[in-house]
Image (cartoon, coloured by chain):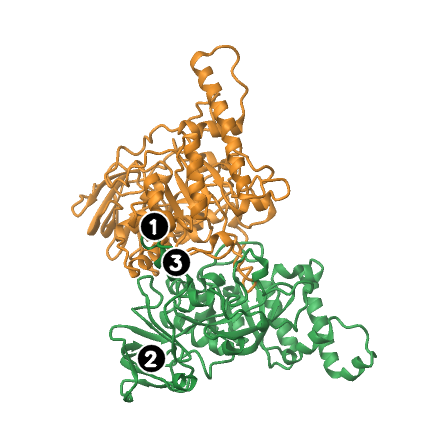
Amino acid sequence: MIAFLLAQTIAITGGTVYPVSGPKIDNATVLIQGGRIAAVGTNVAVPAGATRIDATGKWVTPGLIDGGGQMGLTEIGAVQGTNEAVLRGSDVAAAFNVTEGINPASALIPVTRIEGVTTALAVPFGGLITGQAVLIDLDGATIEAMLIKSPVGMVVNLSEDSKGAGGGSRAGVAARLRQIFNDAREYGRRRADYTRAQMQPLAAPAADLEALQPVLRGELPVFAIANRRSDLETALRIAKEYKLQLILAGAAEGWQIAGQIAAAAVPVLVVPLDNIPSYDQLGIRYENAALLAAAGVKVVLLETDTHNSRNLRQQAGNAVAYGMTWEQALRAVTLSPAEVFGVAGRYGSLETGKVANVVVWTGDPFEFSTGVEHVFIRGREIPLRSRQTELLERYRTLPPKY
Amino acid sequence: MRRLSAALLLGALAAGCASAGAGPTQSPPPSPVPTQSASAPRAASADTTSADRAQYPSTYQRHPNPPVLIRNATIMTATGQEIAGGSILFRDGRIVAVGTTVEAPADAVVVDGTGKWVTPGIIDSHSHLGVYAAPATDAESDGNEATNPVTAEVWAEHSVWPQDPQIPLAIAGGVTTIEVLPGSANLIGGRSAILKLIPARTVQEMKFPGARYGLKMACGENPKRVYRTRGPSTRMGNMAGYRAAFIQGEQYRRRWDKWNKDHQGDPPQRDLGLESLAEVLRGNIFVQNHCYRADEMVQMIDLAHEFGFKIRSFHHAVEAYKIADILAREGTAVSIWADWWGFKEEAMDGIHENAALVQQAGGRPVIHSDSESGIQRLNQEAAKAMYYGRRAGIQVTRDQALRWFTANPAWVLGLDSIVGTLEPGKMADVVLWSGDPLSVYARALQVYNDGWLVYDRNDPAHQPKTDFSIGRQP
């Protein structure tokens, strides 16, 4: 059975294909074989026996990738027993990898994927060094089956929310972070001494210092949450000092230093539909994504309400309304997140050899008038059902038939 | 949903406030044929209960401005029409003419609407602007008097901060009138404020003249969580709490009504909370009832029947679709989101088709925000709800979807004869859009409130800033 499914061949024909890696192709075929994209183009031979999907008049894109939420880690916001994204009791939780908190049976997964979001980052939150984010496909009966990459990055919070971890001062946060990095470096050099208890007390438990080694080697990126311009600059400064691979997240005032961020080649994760000022982000504005992109920054668009991760496309549409080009916005929810999350070899575009996460839309994916016609994750066609579609069917005519 | 960006990657434990409302009404079907003259709103609900003294009167005054003719636009009137190549003329705060052949008076400012759309000003039946002002510090947290489960005596207008920097953002989203409600911590949270959304020094200048107050009530999880240790701590405790309050309110109403009639002896002792409840029982204050679950809404309908009032609108009502028939029969509107769900147990059954199903059943859906962010794009949220409904095979017209954020909330506020549609005689609350307002790409270009150009995307002279926002940023 599994072998059969893997071998299944699907041809999506006649649609307007947006590969993202290249210009759109009218009246093109996307051929899926064995869970991978086998061919994309106008001259694709469809093998006999292939399942044909007529996409005439439709738009075909890669599945959208949302990096903003806790997919799989939360079920009901207010019910603690269903939330797995916070490691309580420690504001330095570098060793905290959320993978085993993921619930493949979460009702949010079908709700989300039938709207065209096929891949999501599961992101821990809280504390100063928050933990490790992992990337999942929104299909699979087990954690192993869903997991794409773990870890994707180390989440570090430099916004006002983490000040408690620095004694109530931003300067304290920066100093503590440096101390942790210094100790992690020292620990990495002197593991033997540590084991023989011949080191001074360190700023974090060994497991956390161990988890920071790939960060300090520049192999595992740091997702630095920061909004105030000075905090963004602190993140850039610390990243430079320790030669970190930096990704900025939030970055509400990023537009003010877009050139500096671009020059540092640091990608930025942005929520387009956020413009509510606070003392952490007085300069926040809708045009942030567009201004960053215009300056040459690699921008990834986010929806941070996990239950409405499906609104990523609305976020993207609004990014366009406030100045991004449509092509930039599509890239910012497909190929750019794949690149930033380190999986662009397999995800983010419709190219031969890539994982077949493909969505067939009735039109422009960012428009409300557009619906989803087909979703493929790893080449499997996803039934367009969720708990919500079942509620609709149950109550479509009243009284319901219980 | 407050502070999502600060909470970026921090998990959106959506606040999903609550508010609620109920109110007396005759509940006629949404009438596409309103109106009388706009600037004389029908008299509403001065406090008849007690004092023959002024009760925090509105000092709203129409801003003087020249007549405006927007021409050659697509005009969505919210009365069933979508007029291509249409024009709209307004003068002295009143809509004068809408159609394809409208003459430009010599003194009119003429705005070219080619390729653009025009709608009525947006009305949000559920906002906390001013009472939960940015920057969202404790100092600005003025929305829940969470010191007692029944605080019918508090008035939201006494918390509203006109310099809330979120107000100009909502104006730029095309919003012209809002109902500011107390939060949902309490069974009975207090009176709402109905405001013209304009730059102003005082809330009195914003108060919609003649508008009735609403009374915020809340069901379900919030009150029983907030008062867990002192009660109510259960849903049955919630119900007992409303009933006890209204029993007192009834008594108070009888005592005052008698005294107002015969003036025998000293007037009864005034009680601000009971005054609000008595006004509900007299039909002068609209109940706005935060309530998520279908079964609880029906409990609240029973409560309203017991005491002889009507619930004007349920708010949030994520399960309205399960009882759409009952809600239509009761004539109670539902103020809902397009897609919020999942932030707590009573919000688990939200579906995209909620508004469409309520509409189909003959009810009155309203797309509300309960959010300083969502209020900036109520048109988008309504569009989402409309298209999801259509894709599920439920007939929803563009005009109906437009009414979800214009005429229907006007009705919820009792102002449907004054605002909410584009018709001669109505108040000139008008939005000019860059494109189809039901598209994700449309932005409000100009917003007129009572004829006053309060926002112009292309003219910094018409982009109001609050005191909070000036002098802080480069």
Q: Earlier in the sequence, mark 3 or mark 1?
A: 3
Q: Look at chain A in the picture and name its colour.
A: green
Can residue B194 be seen? no
Identified by mark 3, the residue type is Leu
Q: Comparing marks 3 and 1, which lies closer to the viewer? A: 1
Say the numbered circle drawn on residue A391: 3
Residue with the mark numbered 1: A399
Task: Give the spatial CA distance, label 1 vs label 2.
Answer: 50 Å
Mark 1 or 2, nearer chain start: 2
Residue behind mark 2: A23
Residue A179 falls in image quadrant: bottom right
Residue drawn where x is 64% and y is 80% of the image: A214
The amino acid type, in three-letter code, at marker 2 is Pro
**Same subunit under labels 3 and 1?**
yes
Hey, which residue is sitting farthest top in the picture? B264
Which of the two discs, 3 and 2, sits closer to the camera? 3
